[in-house]
Amino acid sequence: MSPNGFPATVADAPRSVAPSVPVAASSGLPLADLGGGHAVPDDAQLAQLLSPRPVSHNEQPAAHAQDHAPFYFLQQDVPAKPASKAFGSNPVTSGSQRGTSDWFSNTPSPAGFGLPSEAELIALLKPAQFGLPSGSGGAASSESAAPYYFLEHSQASHSAPSVKHGQHASPPSWPGSHAGVGTARPPFDVNVVRRDFPILQERVNGRQLVWLDNAATTQKPQSVIDRLSYFYQHENSNIHRAAHTLAARATDAYESARDKVRGFLNAASSNEIVFVRGTTEAINLVAQSWGRQNIVKDDEIVISWLEHHANIVPWQQLCAEKGAKLRVIPVDDDGQILLDEYAKLLTPKTKLVSFTQVSNALGTITPAKQMVEMAHSVGAKVLVDGAQSVSHLRADVQYLDCDWFVFSGHKIFGPTGIGVLYGKEALLNETQPWQGGGNMIKDVTFEHTQYHAAPGRFEAGTGNIADAVGLGAALDYVNQLGIENIAMYEHQLLQYATHQLRSIPGLRLIGTAEHKASVLSFVLKDHKTEHVGAALAREGIAVRSGHHCAQPILRRFGLEATVRPSLAFYNNCADVDKLIAAVRRIQNGQHAI
Ligand code: PLP
């Protein structure tokens, strides 16, 4: 600690996500100006709203209310400012919560398919209930007598072992912690949030890192890093098997993570949550199990032009094997799904529709709920690729009514090598496993094997236990910020960045859909994309340049590659400004490339 009590190093930095005051109040903007009447804030307002608010050394941030009290959730009972009293006095009603949730879940609202109404914005931005548990729920010592899932054979008692305050970063879960089902949190302060991500302090090529490659992978908060470390220090064991304490702890931690995913997706049961390696593996699982068992010659599989190769190649392989046909929904010049064309593709031959909720190359948000309904109307099953949506929008699988939903942990602030296949329980249980081995069986003889019900039947062998637990910690982190708060903040930052990029001569934005998340693909006249990427990297700015594993959609725009900055909630206006200044220098020939 420095003499004034503020962190001297990153390691000392408070890692709270506690908002000190609501965003609107901290920016000095009247709430009604934030998109009220569907107006978008002007540049000055956006810059004021989004730019870093320097923490005065005379001002004790809420995050710092306690020495070594690093987590927001741990401070629930220690309001840092008298103003926080207001947080309890203005609950957001379930009605307005549904309204905001609808907007972020990509639902046509009465006002159209777009910006939230003034009332919805105010409901979002006004101080609301923290929605946090009182008491120590979930923070029991690992040595406590908390019952373990494995030893108790109980589905209900997944109380995550955790450690003493300050040692262990695994936030507790609490009933109703899923914001989409009745809680709301105050908006976050990006400066406080940034302190939770140690890598953002990293120096790259002599400059502080500006991480704008979030569509490729996201950075990890300290709570996730700590949770992984804690697992290997205190819980590591194989799961579901041995009758000893560490097996119980590891099993508990793993099953607790499954339940967190269930809550995060609003799935009906944790039996619907299968852990896999990532989105790619999840899609291949469906193609190689359900697909092989159900697709026959002349059936049709519909995908969209926006898809990542992971949502093209497995279906192509299946079609080649079965003699089925792949049909592709076209997009308009802004990169938006042409719903009329989609409707024409849907026939009784359509057995499966598989599409992304957010395009990784363009950022387009697809009208997922409507597309699912349309597919179901001809009896097709639907897979929604949530790889690019889960970290930006509410993913509510019951609301979407999709048959499968897939995502990767590393794109939502969790570890690599872990991901999720959600499937409706009956459908999963009708589907034969695609891999055989340990863990997925009830009984084996040389003549016959009896499989477990889902999810076990799809988790053959030893899975990625620690990283599943890490994913649970990442979802806790996102829940604490509140996905609606994240979506609101990112929406404004994306608008700010879009406006700035558009002002650069010779820059062409690729993907100009009305509804977008995170992604800002562009090409720069007379400059190769790889050179732009390399020049930015020399300034410590990480963006992706290339085809983004989505060649068909780039070719739709006559391109083989773009430069692709992509935003997450820890980015701020300063990051965008550095990007813009660097691109301008490249454009003006002031960069050696
Ligand atoms: N789908 C989309 C939309 C993606 O953006 C990605 C990765 O960028 C994938 C699928 C594949 O994800 P993973 O490589 O984590 O399996």
Image (cartoon, rainbow, N blue to C red):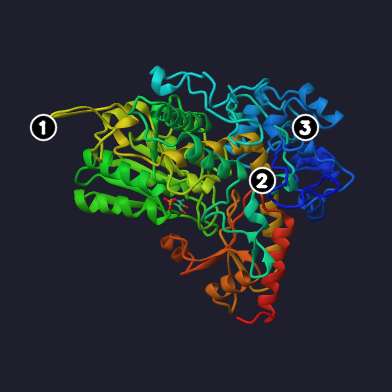
Look at the numbered discs 3 and 2 and tell me whether their residues touch, using CB distance below 8 Å.
Answer: no
Residue visible at 77% across and 48% down?
7
Q: Is residue 322 above or below residue 234?
A: below
* Towards the viewer: 555 or 472: 472
Q: Amino acid at mark 3?
A: Lys
Give the quarter of the image for residue 434: top left
Q: Position of residue 290 (x, y in %)?
A: 27, 38
* Residue at the disc numbered 1: 446
> Is label 2 in a helix, a strand or a loop?
loop
Q: Residue furthest left?
A: 447
Look at the numbered discs 3 and 1 and tell me whether their residues touch, using CB distance below 8 Å.
Answer: no
Q: Position of residue 387 (x, y in %)?
A: 48, 47
Q: Residues within 10 Å of mark 3 (few under 14, many from 20)?
A: many
* Residue at the disc numbered 2: 196
Give the quarter of the image for residue 166: top right
* Residue at the disc numbered 3: 126
Residue visible at 58% across and 24% down?
140
